[in-house]
Structure formats: C-alpha cells, structure tokens
Image: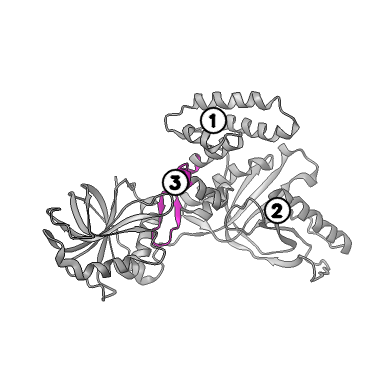
C-alpha cells in the first residue's frame, strides 16, 4: 500500500489536494489508520486518480468531474467529451497550447488502454559521484532551469572542469509532490582532478553524492510533460516487485535542451534508490508473532456497550474501556465473558464510531447511556496479537497481508475480540482482530 505522501510524490499531487479529494468523495483512501489518522492507498486507485487529474487539466471543475468517475462511463463517452474540448481549445490563444497537448496525450492513452507501455525498469548498483550542486526551495518546478543557470554562472566564473561523460541531474528531496516551494537540488558531476573553489556564503556546495546498492532506473523519451507517466510505471513496478523508495529520486538528463535537440528527442533517466520491503513487524520477536490469519465465517451477533465517536486524537479508547469496566454487570443477556471492540468506517473528517461492549442475546433493558450494535454475518480474516502490538498488527494487515493475499477487505465493521481469559495487565495476553473480507 502507498502512504499518502508516496502517492503524492508518484502522481505529483500535493497531500493537501489528496485530502481535499477524500473530503469531496472523489478519491477515498483504501484504508485509514484510526490510531494515527494516516491514509493509505492501493495501486489500483492510480488510474482513478489519473482520470481526475486529466479531467481537471482539461478545465473541468471538481463538481463536473465527480459524475464522470462513475464505473459505467464508457470510453466512447470520454473520447467524445475530450474531442469536444479539443476542438474548443483549437480556437484559443497560444497560452492554451500546453493544455491542448495534454488532451492529445490523454486521447492516445485511451486508444492504448489495456496495452503494455514500452518501459523497462533496470536495477543498477550506482557508485558515489563527486558533484557541485545548488539546493533551494523554488516557487514552482518551472524554476529548475534557473537553478542550472545560476550553477553554470558559478562554474564559468571559477573555471571549474566538469566530467565530460556524466550528464547533469536534479534530485527531489521532498517526500511528497508540492505545488510550490519544492526542495530541489540541481547538480553537475565534476572531473576528479578539478580544482573547486566554494564560497560558503552561497547555496552552492561541493559534495560526494552517495551511491546506492540498488537503484531502480527507467528511461523516459520525449518532452518532460510526459514524465508523470514514466514515474507512474516506475512506482508501480517497485510496488509489484517488493521494493520501496530509500532516498530522493533523480532525473538524469542524458539528452536535453542543452544538447540542442527538439523536445521529442529528449532522453531522461529516472533513478530511484530502493530497498526490499521487510515485514511490517520489524523486531525479531514481532516477526515470530506474525502469523497467517485464520479465515472463518462468524454468524451475526449484537454488542451492547458504550459508544465513542471521534478521531481518537487523544487516545480516548482506553478511557472508554475504563468507563465500561465498572458497569459490565449492568449489561443484561450476555452470551459470555468475551468483550468486543466494534469499529465502523471513517467519515470524510476522520471520525469513526467505536463500541466497547459484550455480545447479548437480546437488546431489551439496555443500560442508560449505552447502545446496541448489530454486526451482520460475515467472512473474516482473524489475526492474533497483543495490546502492545495492536497498532503494528493493523499496519501489517493493511499494508502487507491484504495487498499480497487473494482477499479484499469488504464493507462492514471490523472488531477486536478480548477472550474470557484476556488480562489487560499482561502485555503478552492474546487478543484477536477480525477483518471483514471477500
């Protein structure tokens, strides 16, 4: 699964924008961690996001885009809509030419939908390299060229010798895409015997750019406006092959504007330092505790107890259980001594419902201040854990197990089951997490 920052960097959309799309119901996270509020997305949502971005680039408002995201919208309808916009833009001034080019790219993508794209990802071991660079927070990505101009002026002033066989590059240090004030570093390799004079009052510095044991690399051919698609493929490949990013990505300009060729002949290598993804449970003890879940169907049941509604920002759930404990005997018609923590889905603001209580055979005589929650019959993946590892277990379930399993999470509440012999004072006392699946 992708954290919101990773999806932001992949799609070049700010985290603020992704949260806004979530609030409007355009692109909701596949899972939101109720303990931290972190949003997580899956690779299958990228085409959906790309459609939003493409339609937005065409000038459609988010309100207009929402009905176009229906699953029953056909490619014919989309193609027709794009052609109408294409004709409209042909009559606009030169400042609209870039938008017109993006529409043409989108039309080509529709024609090729379902066909493989010609990208080959190669894993390389990258050696360290001496560079002279300038790193700044720039108002927009369009200002990258100005960084190279400033750097070139400095090189010319002090007669610094460049490495003739190594092209210039840009490093992106942000962990997410930013609409403005991005942390960007422009760098050029220098000859090993070059004499370099650095004025410490400037943003320019001499450094040894660290190498990488494993660098995932892919070649992009053509104008820079199409880089997002190549990035999309690279991140999809890393996810599918069990890798994750381990440092800033680089764009190496093998053939660009300084070589005097047309944009269609640009050649850019995108480099991403990566590492193999370890299991979500990091320590040896936690890895030993990580077990395959039991798959089972649990009949419908009803829980009566105290209800919480909120974001759990101040860790209020333990207090809810503390309030319930002295009132346990008030709950009539209990089916046993096992306690349940039943949790519903988060709303657009990050709030969720949670009931701490006990299963009952009847909802008559519900104690004052308590509620009943009917949980339908459902198939579940059941994970054993402990209170100290509950958060990491939820992370493992949604970030590792679900993406790699043959199951999908389905609608319906998940819940925690605290058995008859569960002891909250014992950190090793087992409990169980039930995740609804299909």
State left or right for residue 237 relative to residue 296. right
Q: Which mark is residue 38?
A: none
Which residue is labeled 3 in the image? 28
Q: Residue drawn at (43%, 58%), measured in percent from left and top?
A: 37
Label 2 residue SS: loop
> Can you tell which quarter of the image residue 433 is in?
bottom left
Which residue is labeled 1 in the image? 110
- Badge 2: few (under 14), some or many (20 or more) residues near its Cα, within 10 Å? some
Residue range in magenta is 22-47
Alpha carbons under labels 2 and 1: distance apart: 33 Å
Rendered position, 375 above or below 424:
above
Alpha carbons under labels 3 and 1: distance apart: 24 Å
Q: Residue drawn at (50%, 53%), measured in percent from left and top?
A: 4
Decide which of 337, 291 is in the foreground and name it: 337
Residue 434 seen: no
Position of the C terminus by quadrant: top left
Q: Give the label, 2 or 1, closer to the camera.
A: 2
Q: Of label 2 and label 1, which has the lower sequence position?
A: 1
Which residue is labeled 2 in the image? 139
Rendered position, 127 above or below 378:
below
Q: Give the label, 3 or 1, closer to the camera.
A: 3
Decide which of 94, 381 is in the foreground and name it: 94
Residue 45 seen: yes
């Amino acid at each position: 699964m992708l954290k919101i920052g990773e999806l932001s960097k992949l799609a070049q959309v700010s985290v603020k924008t992704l949260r806004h799309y979530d609030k409007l119901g355009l692109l909701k996270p596949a899972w939101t961690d109720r303990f931290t509020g972190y949003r997580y997305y899956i690779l299958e949502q990228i085409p959906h996001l790309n459609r939003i971005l493409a339609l937005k680039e065409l000038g459609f408002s988010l309100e207009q885009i929402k009905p176009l995201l229906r699953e029953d919208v056909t490619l014919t309808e989309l193609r027709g809509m794009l052609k109408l916009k294409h004709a409209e833009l042909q009559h606009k001034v030169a400042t609209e030419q870039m938008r017109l080019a993006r529409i043409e790219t989108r039309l080509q993508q529709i024609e090729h939908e379902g066909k493989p794209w010609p990208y080959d990802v190669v894993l390389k071991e990258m050696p360290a390299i001496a560079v002279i660079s300038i790193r700044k927070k720039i108002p927009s990505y369009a200002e990258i060229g100005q960084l190279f101009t400033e750097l070139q002026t400095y090189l010319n002033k002090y007669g610094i010798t460049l490495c003739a066989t190594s092209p210039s590059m840009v490093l992106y240090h942000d962990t997410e895409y930013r609409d403005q004030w991005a942390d960007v570093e422009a760098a050029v390799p220098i000859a090993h015997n070059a004499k370099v004079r650095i004025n410490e009052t400037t943003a320019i510095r001499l450094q040894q750019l660290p190498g990488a044991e494993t660098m995932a690399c892919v070649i992009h051919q053509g104008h820079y406006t199409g880089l997002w698609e190549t990035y999309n493929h690279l991140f999809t490949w890393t996810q599918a092959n069990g890798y994750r990013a381990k440092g800033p990505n680089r764009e190496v300009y093998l053939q660009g504007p300084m070589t005097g060729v047309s944009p269609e002949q640009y050649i850019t290598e995108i480099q991403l330092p990566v590492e193999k993804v370890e299991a979500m449970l990091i320590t040896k003890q936690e890895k030993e505790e990580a077990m395959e879940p039991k798959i089972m169907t649990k009949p419908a049941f009803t829980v009566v107890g105290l209800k919480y509604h909120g974001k759990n920002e101040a860790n209020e759930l333990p207090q809810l259980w503390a309030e319930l404990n002295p009132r346990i005997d008030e709950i009539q018609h209990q089916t046993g001594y096992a306690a349940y923590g039943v949790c519903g889905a988060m709303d657009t603001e990050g709030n969720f419902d949670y009931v701490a209580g006990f299963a009952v055979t009847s909802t008559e005589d519900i104690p004052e201040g308590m509620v009943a929650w009917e949980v339908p019959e459902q198939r579940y993946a059941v994970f054993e854990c402990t209170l100290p590892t509950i958060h990491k277990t939820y992370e493992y379930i949604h970030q590792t197990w679900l993406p790699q399993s043959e199951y999908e999470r389905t609608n319906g509440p998940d819940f925690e089951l605290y058995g008859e012999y569960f002891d909250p004072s014992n950190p090793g006392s087992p409990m169980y997490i039930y995740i609804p699946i299909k």
